[in-house]
Image (cartoon, rainbow, N blue to C red):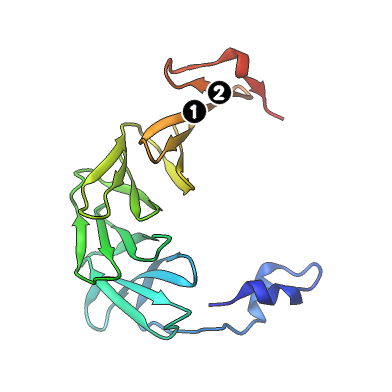
């Protein structure tokens, strides 16, 4: 782990990021004896790690690493028993969610350490995960689901097929089927939709599901 904010003052003109990182000594270093499958960086130096430990035969281990208060300790949270392909950590660092190779969704609280809050309850394979506050945002085959972090039930959903989603503030941004959609996390509904077609960027009327001709603008 490097504190790059302080170190970037020493970067040389024309130096690549990789060369710069290669000549740095990490602020914290921790060697894991097994295989790290996925990582996610949270706020304030908190990291979620998914790994396997071949020596013990344990697969799908979920760890929480606090690089500020406990830089040398990987705190194990739970185990899926199947290899993990993706991991996400909430802004509060109190919750970690993962996807395993079967597309099952697992969700754990890092504070009370009582094991999984929810797993394999969503009835569809999960392709991508993120967090809106403490709420996991789960991308499935034919819908986007916002999961209630208190009990693991689906709090809100959008019955659309998306390829990729990201969260910022109170909005969820998703792409798929030639559209870019903005979803209000508070209402769980699409608030804005955009389309690209024949070199034209157009605003789509959400209610009518058609391109608004007056707002169409050619891309630069």
Image mark for residue 193: 1
Name the image quarter holding the C terminus: top right
Measured as percent of width and height from the top left, residue 153 is found at 21, 47
Where 130 sits versus 190, above or below?
below
- Looking at the image, which residue is at 57% across and 82% down? 26
Q: Is residue 43 above or below residue 54?
A: above
Q: Is residue 53 found left or right of 26 in the rendered image?
A: left
Q: Residue at x 80, y 67 (%)?
A: 14
Question: Cβ–Cβ below 8 Å for labels 2 and 1?
Answer: yes
Element type at marker 2?
strand
Measured along the vertical axis of the image, is residue 79 above or below residue 30? above
Q: Where residue 205 sits in the image (x, y, percent)?
A: 48, 19
Residue 76: give x, y in percent of width and height: 29, 76
User: Could you classify mark 1 by the number of other residues whose Cα lies within 10 Å: few (under 14), some (14-19), or many (20 or more)?
Assistant: many
Between 87 and 52, the residue placed more toward the observer is: 87
Q: Residues within 10 Å of mark 2 (few under 14, many from 20)?
A: many
Residue most extreme to the right: 13
Total marks in image: 2
Seen at 39% across and 53% down, the residue is 131
Q: Determine if residue 178 is in view.
A: no
Of mark 2 and mark 1, the one earlier in the sequence is 1
Dot 1 falls on a residue whose secondary structure is strand
Q: Is residue 24 left or right of residue 204?
A: right
Q: Which residue is mark 2?
A: 203
Residue 184 appears in the figure:
yes
In space, the residues marked 2 and 1 are separated at their CA atoms by: 6 Å
Is residue 55 rendered to the left or right of residue 91? left
């Amino acid at each position: 782990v490097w504190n790059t904010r302080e170190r970037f003052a020493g970067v040389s003109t024309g130096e690549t990021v990789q060369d710069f990182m290669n000549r740095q000594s990490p602020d914290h270093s921790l060697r894991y004896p097994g295989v790290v499958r996925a990582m996610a960086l949270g706020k304030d130096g908190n990291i979620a790690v998914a790994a396997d430990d071949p020596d013990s035969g344990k697969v799908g281990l979920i760890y929480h690493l606090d690089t500020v208060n406990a830089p040398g300790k990987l705190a194990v949270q739970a185990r899926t028993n199947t290899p993990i392909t993706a991991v996400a950590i909430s802004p509060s660092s109190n919750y970690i969610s993962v996807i395993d190779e079967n597309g099952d969704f697992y969700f754990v609280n890092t504070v009370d350490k009582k094991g999984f809050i929810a797993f394999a309850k969503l009835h569809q394979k999960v392709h991508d995960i993120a967090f809106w506050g403490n709420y996991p945002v789960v991308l499935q085959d034919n819908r986007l689901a916002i999961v209630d972090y208190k009990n693991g039930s689906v709090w809100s959903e959008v019955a659309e097929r998306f390829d990729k989603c990201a969260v910022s503030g109170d909005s969820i941004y998703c792409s798929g089927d030639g559209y870019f959609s903005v979803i209000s996390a508070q209402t769980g509904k699409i608030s804005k939709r955009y389309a690209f077609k024949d070199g034209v960027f157009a605003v789509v009327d959400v209610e009518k599901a058609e391109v608004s001709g007056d707002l169409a603008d050619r891309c630069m």
